[in-house]
Amino acid sequence: MLRVVMEEGCTTRSKVLNYLGERFRVKMNLPEWFTNEQCASFLMEQCLCIHLKSDVEKFYLLCLMTRKLFTFAKQECMEENPDSLMCQEVLTPGQLYLMFLKEKMAAWLVSVKISIDKRAHRLQWSGVTMENLMKMFTMGADLTKPFEYLLATGNLHSKTGLGMLQESGLCVVADKLNFIRYLSHFRCVHRGAAFAKMRTTTVRRLLPESWGFLCPVHTPDGEPCGLMNHMTAHCQVVAPVHSTTTLPALLCSLGVTPVGGTPSQPYSDCYPVVLDGAMVGWVDRELAPVAVDSLRRFKVLKEKRIPPWTEIVLVPQTGKSSIYPGLYLFTTPCRLVRPVQNLALGQEELIGTFEQLFINVGIFEGEIEPGVTTHQELFPHSMLSVVASFIPYSDHNQSPRNMYQCQMGKQTMGFPLHSFQERSDNKLYRLQTPQSPLVRPYMYDHYNMDNYPIGTNAIVAVISYTGYDMEDAMILNKASWERGFGHGCVYKTELVDLAEKMKGEDCLVFGAKPGDPKVMGKLDVDGLPPIGAVLHYGDPFYSYINLNTGQSFVTFYKSKESCVVDNIKVCSNDAGTGRFKRICLTVRVPRNPTIGDKFASRHGQKGILSRLWPAEDMPFTESGMTPDILFNPHGFPSRMTIGMLIESMAGKSGALHGMCHDATPFRFSEENPALEHFGDMLRAAGYNYYGTERLYSGLSGLELEADIFIGVVYYQRLRHMVSDKFQVRTTGARDKVTNQPVGGRNVQGGIRFGEMERDALLAHGTSFLLHDRLFNCSDRSVAQVCLDCGSLLSPLLEKPPPTWSATRHRKTICTLCGKSDSIDTVSVPYVFRYFVAELAAMNIKIKLDVK
């Protein structure tokens, strides 16, 4: 390496700077009067170890990096894993905003410079005045628009890319489908869109280093699995910045040799001390643990101006090839930290991702070893995210079921907010009859989720009854449905702006003409429907008038679903001087459960409502109680959701004793099983120890032979409803070119009968059905063909002379053969005729052989 430097003639400091400046100045957009040495100094300052200010600090850090490189080359230390959480920090919105603002401010300055350069000759005559300068500044690049665009689309328009691996998807709408979904948006950490396209799975792995910081359960299944993670409930991101100027002196008082000095031991027996990426000194191997203990005490007790979010990492020398040893201190923002109990001091301490690898943290009291274990978890469930900690008895379920519930909990119809009258969201779901769960984890109350409930307590019997509950279907008691089980509605909002109807004209206002027949008396004089009015398909929705012409326009309600007008907000401009031109119309669509709607328990047991069964035909208990839901027993063995069975028993005992049960995971163990606890409670209330009861058939009245497991389970209604998904078509719109039915639910289109469906009908031998689907119901058309020349295009109607009457019969004549007796009619798909015409335009003739 040094030989190459000598060959280039870089023997002195000034020669090296001159050499660097000469090579790099092309890319640096610096003024021409800068010397090569000044360019090199600018390069060093802006592009090399930019977190350090002085050249001396940069020199010592580069020396440490070189030592580490040689150690790695000699295979005395391992490479660090870039996918491990210990080497990562979070990109917060503030950081992104600041980087973007810095770049846009720099661009603005450049644009102002250019505009001043252009008008320099004018300024010589008029002089530099305040007005001239203000004009120059306003002509500079706009700063507001890029930020509005970034927030609206999530796309980053930047010349440098800000060192990011992606340019889109940086913004997410924090939609309030329900409160759980809203919470989880703010705890989500995505690895980056660039990793989603990678073929390797190493990026997605759940590594043990992320324990307590990232939830092992709450990640979606499918494409973003392992890339979109969620922080645990107690994990936090360091936001404040604290001055570290006093720390080097404190370290020296604890036995650290300053970086410029010589330690008492050889360098091989010392650890380098690195503070926020700056080399501050060396510490003896024997002294290091004592210094670390002192620093940790100061940190926990908030002494010596050490911030509480400081990360103190002592990587020991093991004699084997492991992580490069040293004493590392971090106080910078954007790191993940979490609270644990410091056993020596009996207080909470924030530990970081790198720090956690080198300290011993126990979970339960019994695991603590004196002299080894230094910290203890605050809760056994502190490794779970907000959403995962809402699952009752999640430690008794198979892991994928907990993952499914984390996804389904965010799709539940619940009570997302309390200000329905003030909101103008595109779509809001609301459950009319929510309840507080009888069985709830500790975190449910911690987040006050009773203010935003997401389901209903249901009496669930595990029984295979009638066959309508096969393959995850479930039967609902019709009487429960009539009393309001799962009833809900959807709020839809439409923003109507008359300024967009006629661009450039200010003559449209809302209103209706008196006695206008199109209004049908269903709109008020202001042209808007009365609040509480029921709208059906084809009813007038709103009306507006052109003040110049006096003409009125009526817009009709287009949806096939009836709705109720919930509220209407009249919008103005910021000054409040706007005319009656902009309204926000919110309608309420009632959505009570129908066959095909999706329900789920809190254990990933999803099912669709297959039948509303009359109460008189439902099985009933000795006390005459009928269950709300019949759940198929085949849903348990393969899925192993034992948590749902425990919840059923706990809910039943809670309802009998009038109490709520704590369903926090890890409360029960093999020594203290849940079955015994809840079995004894059921027995005390006079019920069977195992939660079963004798049921009687609703059809015959005879007692069923088997004992039926019956209890109370909290059920959620999900947002996937048949009303939003069904697609049906008899006749309707056709494609202009091919004459075939169009596709798509929104345009009343059909569902494509494709290649594979055709194969299925052929395999069944139902050719006439196939002919009907692909021909008669698609684009059958009758065409004339000439039998002699086989042309589809040449037969045309003869041109009548002016003397003929309009009713006279005109013959079809082949323009090529000139005969009319060789014309025959055939049925062909219209798209075939179009294809023939396309080929004719390319000079290719199609000849039909009609037999």
Image (cartoon, helix red, strand yellow):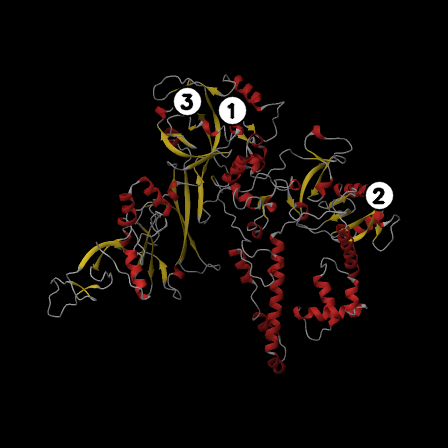
Horizontal side of residue 780 vs 661, given as left or right: left
Q: Report, in whole angstroms, how far the alpha carbon at label 1 lies from the one at label 3.
A: 17 Å
Q: Nearer the viewer, residue 620 or 316?
A: 316
Question: Which quadrant is the N terminus positioned in?
Answer: bottom right
Residue tagged 3: 625
> Mark 2, mark 3: which one is toward the viewer?
2
* Among the 4 quarters of the image, the one containing residue 848: bottom left
> Mark 1, mark 3: which one is toward the viewer?
1
Identify the amino acid type marked 2: Leu
Instruction: Residue 475 in the image: state x and y as whole percent.
Output: 40, 30
Residue tagged 2: 287
Tell which circle, 2 or 3, labels the residue nearer the N-terminal end: 2
Residue tagged 1: 649
Instruction: Residue 562 in the image: state x and y as whole percent.
Output: 34, 44
Q: Is residue 397 above or below residue 325?
A: above
Question: Which quadrant is the C terminus positioned in?
Answer: bottom left
Let me know if residue 532 appears in the view: no
Circle 3: element type: loop
Q: Report, in whole angstroms, how far the alpha carbon at label 2 lies from the one at label 3.
A: 73 Å
Q: Is residue 293 above or below residue 816?
A: above
Labelled pair 2, 3 in contact (Cβ < 8 Å): no
Identify the amino acid type marked 3: Met
Horizontal side of residue 271 vs 680, given as left or right: right
Give the residue furthest to the bottom.
125
Q: Is residue 117 above or below residue 671?
A: below
Circle 2: element type: loop
Q: Nearer the viewer, residue 456 or 776?
A: 776
